[in-house]
Amino acid sequence: MTEPGTSQLKSTLRADLHNSMRERDKVRSQTLRMALTAITNEEVSGTTARELSDAEVLKVLVKEAKKRREASAAYSEAKRPELAAKEEAELTILEAYLPAQLSDAELQTLVAQALRETGATDMSQMGLVMKAATALVAGRAEGGRVAAIVKSALSGS
């Protein structure tokens, strides 16, 4: 079903959109359309249009999931539970396409590995450690969680 030059994940999103339209699942259809639009926008941004790889499509989906998470929190703080629930529903749909999130223990292990690889010992080297840790994590944890663990590891060593 994949078109030549199209990432597997993007093709899966398109097929799932088609199925959700058949099943008349409005929330799922709207969410998948939004995700595919974000992917298309990323493909045409820059100087030349290009096809995104699965890793790049995954980055776009992570970014969209983060937007939903932040919007839900903002709506909850503003006492708008109906809008927060809508954002949570969209987030649940997007999370089905994301890799499983790392536990704190797994994340600490990867950060420790990044610390060993970089040889960092103090906070001035946090950027170096974050670069290595982010590569190891590969979208399986939010940057804020990674940064918090890196910061605690560097301040504790």
Image (cartoon, rainbow, N blue to C red):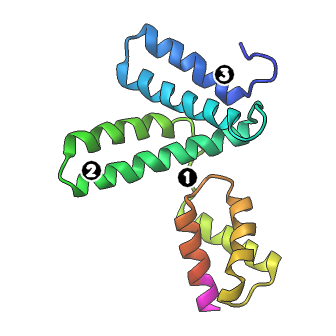
**Image location (x, y in percent) of residue 27:** 37, 25
Residue 112 or residue 65, whichever sits in front: 65
Dot 3 amino acid type:
Ser
The residue pinned by badge 2 equals 75
Left or right placement of residue 98 versus residue 27 in this view? right
Q: Residue at x 21, y 39 (%)?
A: 82
Dot 2 amino acid type:
Tyr
Which residue is at the far left?
79
Magenta-highlighted stretch: main secondary structure?
A: helix
Dot 1 amino acid type:
Gln
Tally the numbered discs: 3
Left or right placement of residue 19 versus residue 90 in this view? right
Q: Is residue 59 above or below residue 153?
A: above
N-terminal-most mark, 2 or 1: 2
**Image location (x, y in percent) of residue 119:** 80, 84
Secondary structure of residue under mark 1: loop
Secondary structure of residue under mark 3: helix
> Badge 3, how many Cα within 10 Å: few under 14, some, many 20+?
some
The residue pinned by badge 3 equals 11
**Residue 34 is a magenta residue:** no
Q: Is residue 144 above or below residue 116?
A: above
N-terminal-most mark, 1 or 3: 3
Determine which quarter of the picture holds residue 117.
Answer: bottom right
Determine which quarter of the picture holds residue 102.
Answer: bottom right
Q: Residue at x 71, y 27 (%)?
A: 8
Left or right placement of residue 139 versus residue 135 in this view? left
Determine which quarter of the picture holds residue 116.
Answer: bottom right
Q: Which residues are magenta?
A: 153-157
Left or right placement of residue 7 versus residue 144 in this view? right
Secondary structure of residue under mark 2: helix
Indicate the quadrant containing the N terminus: top left, top right, bottom left or bottom right: top right
